[in-house]
Image (cartoon, rainbow, N blue to C red):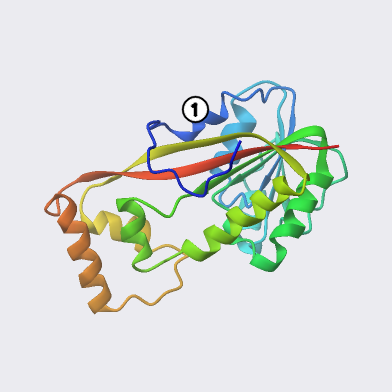
């Protein structure tokens, strides 16, 4: 199977929660890298039987907040994907949701080595990445353009398959719906977030609003956000 950076003909519109639950996660020890606020972590840990999730985050403040959640099925750790504080051959499935491209490019290959190290023989890595395409992406890219880092992330993942670290078990393209009541709603959800360290000038904000308004005359709108999931299997 040839891996693809982008897919223009995406026909599957789903919530990613559904896709994850098609996997056999019961009685598994799982690892999530870059867990953020642990929203997905908690869903995975609590939606089945006998599940354990080790959830790693590099942001110390967020890690402290996660520890305060006191979730019985989740063990929170402060570490990055390039230096995972987990034993060899101990994890059934590794998850990364929209986080692989946040790894510094020089550490991406090391992160994949670490993922292979911690996975059990024939274990799986589920890596979900947003695509640099579509109306939602065009808006966000006006102030937070991730095209290059997403390309580098894809190249690192593809290289791990080409060099037989992993076998590509499946590549899935899908899109999710993102609803905005109006431009203010878009601004609150996308422009006023912690990952956006860019200073948005009044001039740029005006251009972004003009672009948003061009989609549906500034009224409420549902945009589609496309993703690629690479499910990799550890080659022993």
Residue extending farthest to the left is: 217
Q: Quadrant of residue 110?
A: bottom right
Q: Residue at x 71, y 28 (%)?
A: 51
Q: Residue at x 75, y 41 (%)?
A: 166
Whether residue 1 is situated above or below residue 201 in the rendered picture? above
- Is residue 79 visible from the viewing direction of this image? no
Q: Residue 64: horizontal and vertical position, in percent?
A: 65, 57
Quarter in which the N terminus is drawn? top right
Q: Which of 86 and 124 is in front in this view?
A: 124
Q: Name the residue under label 1.
A: 18
Q: Which residue is drawn at 35% across and 64% down?
A: 191
Q: Residue at x 21, y 61 (%)?
A: 211
User: In the drawing, does residue 60 fall left or right of residue 220?
Assistant: right
In what element is the residue under mark 1? Answer: helix
Whether residue 105 is situated above or below residue 120 in the rendered picture? below
Q: Nearer the viewer, residue 83 or 155?
A: 155
Q: In which quarter of the image is residue 155?
A: bottom right
Q: Residue 186: horizontal and vertical position, in percent?
A: 29, 56
Q: Residue 2: horizontal and vertical position, in percent?
A: 59, 40
């Amino acid at each position: 199977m040839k891996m693809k950076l982008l897919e223009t003909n995406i026909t599957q519109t789903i919530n990613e929660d559904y896709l994850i639950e098609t996997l056999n996660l019961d009685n598994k020890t799982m690892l999530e890298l870059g867990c953020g606020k642990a929203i997905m972590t908690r869903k995975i840990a609590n939606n089945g039987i006998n599940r354990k999730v080790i959830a790693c985050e590099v942001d110390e403040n967020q890690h402290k907040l996660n520890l305060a959640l006191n979730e019985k099925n989740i063990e929170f750790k402060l570490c990055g994907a390039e230096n995972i504080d987990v034993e060899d051959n101990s994890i059934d499935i590794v998850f990364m949701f929209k986080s692989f491209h946040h790894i510094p490019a020089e550490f991406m290959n090391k992160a994949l080595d670490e993922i292979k190290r911690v996975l059990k023989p024939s274990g799986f890595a589920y890596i979900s990445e947003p695509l640099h395409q579509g109306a939602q992406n065009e808006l966000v890219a006006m102030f937070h353009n991730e095209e290059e880092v997403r390309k580098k992330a894809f190249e690192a993942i593809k290289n791990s398959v080409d060099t037989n670290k992993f076998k590509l078990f499946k590549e899935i393209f899908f899109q999710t719906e993102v609803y905005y009541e109006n431009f203010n709603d878009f601004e609150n959800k996308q422009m006023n977030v912690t990952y956006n360290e860019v200073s948005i000038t009044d001039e740029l904000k005006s251009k972004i609003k003009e672009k948003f308004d061009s989609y549906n005359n500034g009224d409420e709108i549902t945009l589609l956000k496309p993703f690629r999931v690479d499910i990799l299997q550890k080659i022993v």
